Image (tube, grey):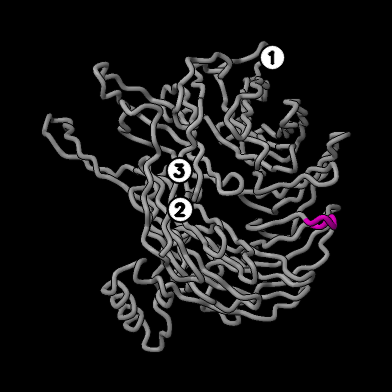
Amino acid sequence: MHRLAWSLLILSQLLFTSSALAQRGSEIKDSPLRVEIPAGSDNETYRIIPCDSTGLVLFYKSLEVTEDGKVKWYFSFYDKDFQLLWTKGVPLAKENEFRKTFLSNDTLALFFEPGPKARENSTNFQLLRIMLPRGSFILNNGEITSSLDLFDFSILKGMFIGGFNASSGLAQLATMDLKTGLVSSYPVGSTGHTTFISMQVKPTDVVVAVMKKQVTKKTWDQFFITIGTDGKVKSECLISTINNDRVLTDSWFLPDNGDETLIAGTYLLFSSVPDQQSQPGMNKATGFYSTKFIEDQQKTLFFYNFLDLSSSKSLMSERDMMNLKKKAMKKSRYAQEASSDMDIILQSFIRHKDQSLLVSETYYPEYHTETFTDFDFYGRPFTNTYTVFEGYRFTNILVTAFDRQGNLLWDNSMEVRNLVAPTLEPRGCLFFSGEDIVMAYLSEGKVASKIIHEGTTSGKVEYSDIDLSSESEKLVTETKDYLYPWYDHYFIACGYQEIKNISGANTQKLIFYFNKLRFE
């Protein structure tokens, strides 16, 4: 029998109270390895980026504006014992917002581009590189078409290589020489609307990607494509679904054995496409698919309906499953497949020994109804009712394991409780402990964990409290909480907490915190 244990490291820790993290507070002896920063609200912009065993970076956008109209962002670097090594402010363009990071050895690159509230003619992006131990910064400024939005990027051989998507029209591959600052961009495709949905930059100076190409107003084809950093397409192959009753919705890929690539993702029955895929925040799918490519040839193709998974009973009740199948049969007497049409996002695709693990999370948008009384022109009362978006309620973390040909080996899931988030950023965490696979997430000040051994659940779900700085404190609420893998068996828990002092003082505070946890 396996048992989960999450422990907080008990070390001396300093609490920081300055908005710039430069002033130090009193020292707390024998407290959890934890940093607390006073916050005005949970809308502040604190972010944590784990940087392997080198340490971690905390950064945020301040309200300070320089004489030339730029806004200062503050960056702080902590070592793995949470000792603050340096804090520095960097002025960046006022309209730019943080988008993505890329970590290579001891250099962290952060990409900033104009946010949705920026002027339409804003085209400048900024790439900030931080040499972590020294605390030195290099800022590159680039320019690209204002309608483009970064999908992902890498740094390779002194060059920035990024994939950009457009709200309409062609996606672009852009490069920037980090010495000269020269930016080059190349459209991907010749006509219509193309979009990156998964990409990877290889050391051989090629970009491998899965891209969507719009076919009709409601449907898209997906292609497996290889592009040189000079923008030239080296190969392009349609990911076939054999017939037209299914549409691929999202995909990730894993290079394997040189010219071999395994692609896996989600699909939707064609009959479900028109009504559901057009709704914002909805990523409907009927099940998973997998396919194997050798060079530019598609060799295998498999579809796995959610209703046929071993973990389907944890995703929905048996009654719901029966109703779906009956509904499908009524719709067409020739129907061979029922549609569960769950909202799902792909989190990662991981190689573990001889298996490929696709990690995904299910959710649904949550609303509440508000009613108020108003009066018409003649003073007569009438009732108005409207719905308010609460956030996305995450419900399950799923792991599906494939062999090298794409055959489904096993699947498992973990129920997610009491986790509502304002965005669709993945919240689950998957890592390996010897022969075991551990699934975990953070919610309401607790880490929930579950062990899988060879696809079978080992033991029960364990819930471990994240200790506060003092026994006299009590957690009231927690929002925007994340659990990040760090290094070895260490993790970072972070988020915004409202904490009440239950001693005689009876005071409350709102903080942004991060804790170091160890899985045992």
Q: In this figure, which residue is indicated by the disc labeled 3?
A: 7
Name the disc covering residue 304, or none. none
Looking at the figure, which quarter contains the N terminus?
bottom left
Residue lying at the far right in this picture: please name it: 180
Q: Is residue 362 visible?
A: no
Indicate the amino acid at tag 3: Ser
Q: In this figure, which residue is indicated by the disc labeled 2?
A: 440
Q: Please determine whether, in this image, residue 147 is positioned above or below residue 276.
A: above
Q: Residue at x 82, y 55 (%)?
A: 203
| Residue 183 in the image, given as x and y percentages of width and height | 82, 40
State yes or no: residue 418 in magenta. Answer: no
| SS state under label 1 | loop
Which circle's residue, 1 or 3, is located before the other in the chain?
3
| Residue 164 in the image, given as x and y percentages of width and height | 69, 48
User: Which of labels 2 and 3 is toward the front?
Assistant: 3
Q: Residue at x 50, y 65 (%)?
A: 399
Q: Please determine whether, in this image, residue 373 is positioned above or below residue 206.
A: above
Q: Main secondary structure of the magenta part?
A: loop
Q: In the image, is 276 to the left or to the right of 166?
A: left
Residue lying at the far bottom in this picture: please name it: 334
Which circle's residue, 2 or 3, is located before the other in the chain?
3
User: Which of labels 1 and 3 is toward the front?
Assistant: 3
Q: Which contiguous range is marked in magenta?
A: 202-206
In this rendering, the count of numbered labels is: 3
| SS state under label 3 | strand
Distance between mark 2 and mark 3 Cα atoms? 14 Å
Q: Residue at x 86, y 53 (%)?
A: 230
**Mark 1 neighbour class, 10 Å CA radius: few under 14, some 14 to 19, many 20 or more:** few
User: Which of labels 1 and 2 is toward the front?
Assistant: 2
